[in-house]
Image (spheres, rainbow, N blue to C red):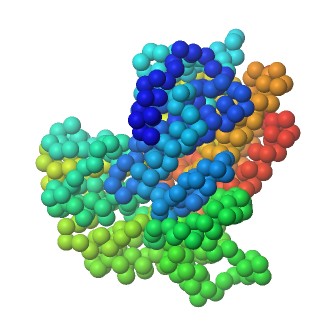
Amino acid sequence: MSSVIEEKKINADTSQPFSEALVVGAGFAGLYMLHRLRGLGISARVLEAGDGVGGTWYWNRYPGARCDVESMEYSYQFSEELQQEWEWTERYATQPEILRYLEHVSERFDLLRDIQFNTRVQSADFDQNESKWCVETSSGQTFSCQFLVMATGCLSSVNTPHFEGMSDFSGSCYHTGHWPHEPIDFTGRRVAIIGTGSSAIQSIPVIAEQAKMLHVFQRTPNFSIPAGNRPLEESYVQEVKSRYPEFRAEGRSQGFGIVDPFPPSAHADPERIPTRQEVEESLQERWDYGGITFLNGVPGLTTDPALNELAADFVRRKIREEVSDPEVADALSPSTMVGCKRLCVDTNYFSTYNRSNVKLVDISQSPIDKIVPEGVSVSGKVYACDDLILATGFDAMTGALSKVEIKGREGLTLADKWKEGPRTYLGLATEGFPNLFIVTGPGSPSVLSNMVQSIEQHVEWISDCMVYMKRAGLVRIEPKFDAEEEWVTHVNELADQTIFPTCNSWYLGANVPGKPRVFMPYLGFPPYVEICRDVADSEYKGFQLA
């Protein structure tokens, strides 16, 4: 299959610079957007900066990279044939397996002929007279379209810190979000990794098995739950496949859009406050099962600080049980509420600190001074290393959009409009930028949901909107100012009822210096879907159509 893909990359037709829809990005969102639009008779083209499909899963190739949503759910559901034919091998798929899946999708649905690779979009200007977008790439190539769809992903723009002396480092430097395509062997080498977020938590146990010495530089510890990863049993796979429509419906009915393995009893009283013993038993059950549905362990865990503290203390005790050095265990134990930052899932993360070749360096009080040729300097002490890894995460939700100079009506730039924080209507569009759609943008469930499910819901809403406009002879659509204002207020009011805004997380952009602190995801997948459906059924209320 790879040889066919390579041939189609080379032979992609680039002779028609105008299309009804231009899609930026060839990950889960861009691929489905292209397939869906084709099926509806709308001409579309995809521009992709990389030399292959995959999006986030094209760039994130670091050791141990895998999804934190179970494979049987983290996949497309638009095609029953695809669901039945693809065979996942593990409960949580690895990056190579997810990439193979997306390559299979692009080949199976003949998508490559309308994707142009190695093409980075540099700017997009809206032509008010012609009601179309003019798009320019970094190589100077230009395209035009009626609809511009930004399928650039929520976690695709890396956050690279600026340490003094970075250019002086004599060894090799890597970022987990932009990892080399060829495998890297750390055997016998001294490695330093900066960061203890999700990518670090996944990669540290793998690197520790190879490295001669691994120093982990931690500013803020993170809560992590055992993944409980394992090969998928054939009986389980067949059981799910035998009832995939019902299985998917279960996921769509949940707040995070993910199937809960422990659904509440039909006779449970939602008003009754559980006892401490009941809370402990429920949390233990979730801990043993593994995965991010730990947050569903107690009703009200994400809204009641007292209940949340019981869960947070539960995890801290688990860390102390697993890490033999009490000081290291304390340093690895977060003081925040559990879930206010992205909950991580891991395989042997905390026990890795019991290895003699792994040392935790707490930089919460004494930050990194600088990078020197031989390693990392903290308070004048140099930690020597041959390889430096930046596991510093992403400029989430808005980072990829901010890298494109997008100009709407009257020359308004998206950067200027969003300088105090992103503002959208439904997370799908933003006032002042006609015919611009964002897949899983800020103000939608996005990263607090099963991303593939949210992507499909957005792609279908956007493409249906295009069909509606085409049939009605309409050429422009953009949110009304009041509708956008009300939506932004609504998103924040929901968040303020929960524990999510209580700590400095990338949900608020707190990991990027200078980025406005605004809570970006929408909380609650089922109600969000209903709102989107209602907007469409009422002929796109809240939007100005022309």
Could you tell me which residue is drawn at 28 percent across and 70 percent down?
A: 353
- Among the 4 quarters of the image, the one containing residue 147: top right
Observer-nearest of 6 and 457: 6
Q: Is residue 197 above or below residue 425?
A: below
Residue 421 visible? The answer is no
Residue 35 in percent (x, y) is at: 63, 36
Q: Is residue 47 above or below residue 30?
A: above
The answer to whether 249 appears left or right of 211 in the picture is right
Quarter holding residue 244:
bottom right
Outermost residue on the right side: it is 538
Instruction: In this rendered view, identify the residue nearer to me: 85 or 371.
Output: 85
Q: Residue at x 31, y 49 (%)?
A: 390
- Left or right: residue 261 versus residue 166 is right
Q: Please tell me which residue lies in front, 119 or 544.
A: 119
**Measured from the top left, where is residue 334 in percent x and y?**
42, 68
The structure residue drawn at horizontal position 66% and vertical position 24%, both measured from the top left corner, is: 43
Q: Quadrant of the C terminus?
A: top right
Q: Is residue 170 left or right of residue 539?
A: left
Note whether residue 466 is visible: yes
Left or right, 291 with reference to 80 = left
Return the residue found at the far top: 129
**Residue 106 place in picture, x, y as percent:** 53, 38
Q: How many marks?
A: 0
Task: Report x, y in % for residue 189.
Answer: 16, 56
**Residue 31 sits above or below residue 123 on the image:** below
Q: Residue at x 44, y 40 (%)?
A: 1
Q: Nearer the viewer, residue 214 or 376?
A: 214
